[in-house]
Image (cartoon, helix red, strand yellow):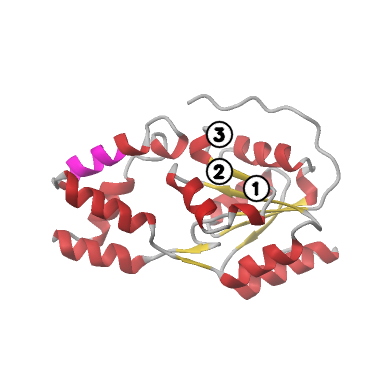
Amino acid sequence: MPGRQLAGPCGPGPAVLIDVGGVLLANDAEAFTTWSARLGIAPASLLTAIFGGCDDQVLVGVVSEPDWWDVVGARLGVGPDLLAELRRALARAGRWDDDLLACLRLIRGRVRTAIISNAWPHMRARLSEAGIAGLVDEVVLSCEVGWAKPDPRIYAEALRRVAVEPGAALFIDDTAGHVAAARSFGLVAHQHVTSAGTVAAIDAFLSGSPAR
């Protein structure tokens, strides 16, 4: 899927750009452990079957999610009913971080905010159903724009949508490479480790203190 053209000037900030998986939504290793045991394979093998090669396919919208799950089913050698059950279970996996969501509610309307996530298409519906999409001004998903972090074009698209310059935006992600790429693009960036640390980084950024 071709990416959209970037357009429109950026202005003053501030803005907060935040990731979903591993940040707003805690990763659920237990779900993969449970399903790998059920399928009789190692957790690493299950992860490879689901995500191996997806970065330039379903993750950026080149292949639809149903078509990608057909690939996964063939890799696992399972029938459509079991595959559908696995797909539903993983689409519900993880736990929303209440502290970070409370922080987004607190800053809503005071600064521009956006979710920027490497995500499959089902994430849009999940964010809406959980009320998370309504907590931010923009939602930028790799599967919709055609670029995935650390591609600089997805950072540019997020900045275009919130209409701020890179140096006036704080980017938050749990992946070191994505954080490094954001810094190279000129954003202020924080690598998420704990909720308290990320809330403190947001507070420091909005108060004008140097971010780490």
Q: Earlier in the sequence, mark 3 or mark 1?
A: 3
In this picture, which residue range is highlighted in magenta? Answer: 68-75
Q: Which structural element holds mark 2?
A: loop
Name the residue: 57% across, 50% down.
178
Can you identify the residue that label 1 sits on? 182
Q: Which numbered disc flags the more N-terminal residue, 3 or 2?
A: 3
What's the residue at 68%, 67% (across, down)? Answer: 103
The question of residue 118 being in magenta is answered with no
In the depicted structure, whether residue 190 falls above or below residue 87: below
Give the secondary structure at mark 1: helix
Mainly helix, strand or loop, the magenta region?
helix
Q: Residue at label 3?
A: 145
As drawn, 102 above or below 75: below
Q: Residues within 10 Å of mark 3 (few under 14, many from 20)?
A: some
Q: Is residue 194 visible?
A: no
> In the figure, is residue 37 to the left or right of 206?
left
Q: Tell me how far mark 3 sits from mark 2, CA to CA.
A: 13 Å
Residue 74, magenta (yes or no): yes
Question: Dot 2, how many residues are within 10 Å of its Cα: few (below 14), some (14-19), or many (20+)?
Answer: some
Q: Is residue 66 left or right of residue 210?
A: left
